[in-house]
Image: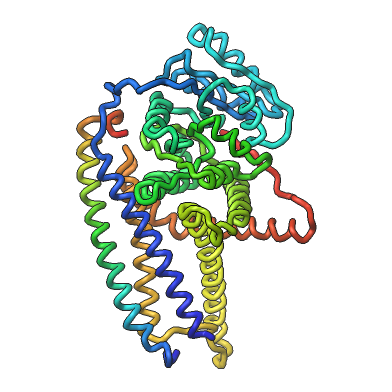
Amino acid sequence: MLDSLYVIAIITIWLSIVMTIVTLLGGVTFIFKHLKHTDIDSLPPLKRYPIVTVVVPAHNEELVIQDTIQAILRLNYPQDKLEVLLYADNCNDGTANEVRALMQQPEFKGRNLQVIERTGTGGKAGVLNDALKIAAGEYLGVYDADAAPETNALYFLVQKVLENPTRYAAAFGRNKTRNYQQNFLTRCINLEIVNTQRIQHTGLWQLFKIGRIPGTNFIINKAIVQSIGGWNNGALTEDTAISFSLMRAGKLIALAHRAEAFQQEPETLFAYYNQRKRWARGNYEVIMENAKHLFDRSSWRIKLEVFYYMCTFFWFNAAIVISNVIFIININLAALQTFFPHLHQLVSLSGELSTLFLINWILMFYLYLLQINIALASDYGQATVTNFIYAIVSYFTYAQLFIIVSVAAMYDIIRDKITGTRHTKWYKTQRF
Amino acid sequence: MVLGSLAWLLPVSLIVTISFGIVVLGLSVCWWLIFKRTVRRFNLKGKDDAR
């Protein structure tokens, strides 16, 4: 029995190393291929400029909404091809008024911008479904209220989708942390985001042409979204859910790596915990809903995505929790041995095996650092000694938070299944 | 722990671990190449070109 557990443990470690190496190889290839590109000051005109409706769902966002709307209205895109819909969704603050005040400024007078005060249900997905009904654009662009796009973001998104408009149902860009220097937490979140966007997203796109719609900074073909029935109202992670729907429809979500937006990340543990628990729970629900596609005639991309998510959220997570529990029990037993010498450790490895496990752990840790540092090296101003030190420290601190968050999300799901109620509500990420 | 019927585990693990080590070494060289090229470019051309 114990022998089999050792085999499962080592296979789990190998699988996670293989997945990391494969993604990293894809990411590195992508970085090498895109080291040289067109000068940002002499971008060629696009083949055509489709009308884009930019939707901004905002729930009590008076602190950040003006910056975001200003950045959207200043996008490098023909004004007559850009429609902006600001949804003040169930707001009880001055979000709508802040935008109306902005519209009075001479620079923005006459722009195609509507402020819609909404009282409906469905959260962000509900807003997007409402926008789907009235949008004039061929494409819908989505920016969260805290995500200010860089001037050329929309240009790059449209450029990407026009490369293959029938196959590419959507294009997504990169999000950067604008408050990353705030504290230890935001610095760690920044490392995670740089790594996700510069290695995972690029790696999966380079190797498998797999993309995932993020919550913000993307455009999507309106007709295609309508054909798959729109967004899943009330979904906790409407982005993951629609990504799977698009893949099931045989479409691709293309990476427009030069389209950038700057967003605000949680600055307190409380805000971080609630945001990530919602994401984890939403992802669990989407994975469980799509698990059946592992065994049906769905495309290989869906199977790969489901497998990837299942490994990350279920298999590896369970393995980490179990190994941490064993580690803590062993430490306690070792301490108790001082007083009760007859006590034995729960698990003890022979010399060779323990060395092997240790080497594999060191490899995994080294890969973690390598992955982050490759990502940092490819991003302007991020390859610093400070970030290197944060990368080391984050492995033992910030990275471990994922265990707590995912266990809490799983607990919520199981509790709700047993009680037949749904406690997890959309907890709005606090702005600063 | 006595390995018994799992005696094969050790040599196989060694081979797999060494293979991972070689790939990771190659990736480390890639990091150095990317770092050298991007740092030079970021320093020479400024933020806009770096995107």
Quadrant housing the C terminus of chain A: top right
* Nearest to the observer: residue A7 or residue A302: A302
Please report the residue visible at 33 percent of the width from the left and 80 percent of the height from the top: B12
Quadrant housing the N terminus of chain A: bottom right
Residue A322 picture location, percent across and down: 55, 71
Image quarter of residue B43: top left
Q: Is residue A367 above or below residue A212?
A: below
* Nearest to the observer: residue A190 or residue A29: A29
* A213 to the left or right of A359: right
Please report the residue visible at 48 percent of the width from the left and 34 percent of the height from the top: A218
| Number of disc labels | 0
Q: Is residue A412 above or below residue A41?
A: below
* A409 to the left or right of A320: right
* Nearest to the observer: residue A267 or residue B45: B45
Image quarter of residue B15: bottom left
Please report the residue visible at 61 percent of the width from the left and 25 percent of the height from the top: A62
Display colour scheme: rainbow
Camera sees residue B48: yes
Q: What is the residue that sits farthest to the front in this orientation? A: A297
* A204 to the left or right of A269: left
Residue A278 picture location, percent across and down: 62, 48
Please report the residue visible at 50 percent of the width from the left and 62 percent of the height from the top: A311
Residue A269 picture location, percent across and down: 57, 48
Residue A94 picture location, percent across and down: 66, 22
Q: Is residue A20 above or below residue A158?
A: below
Camera sees residue A195: no
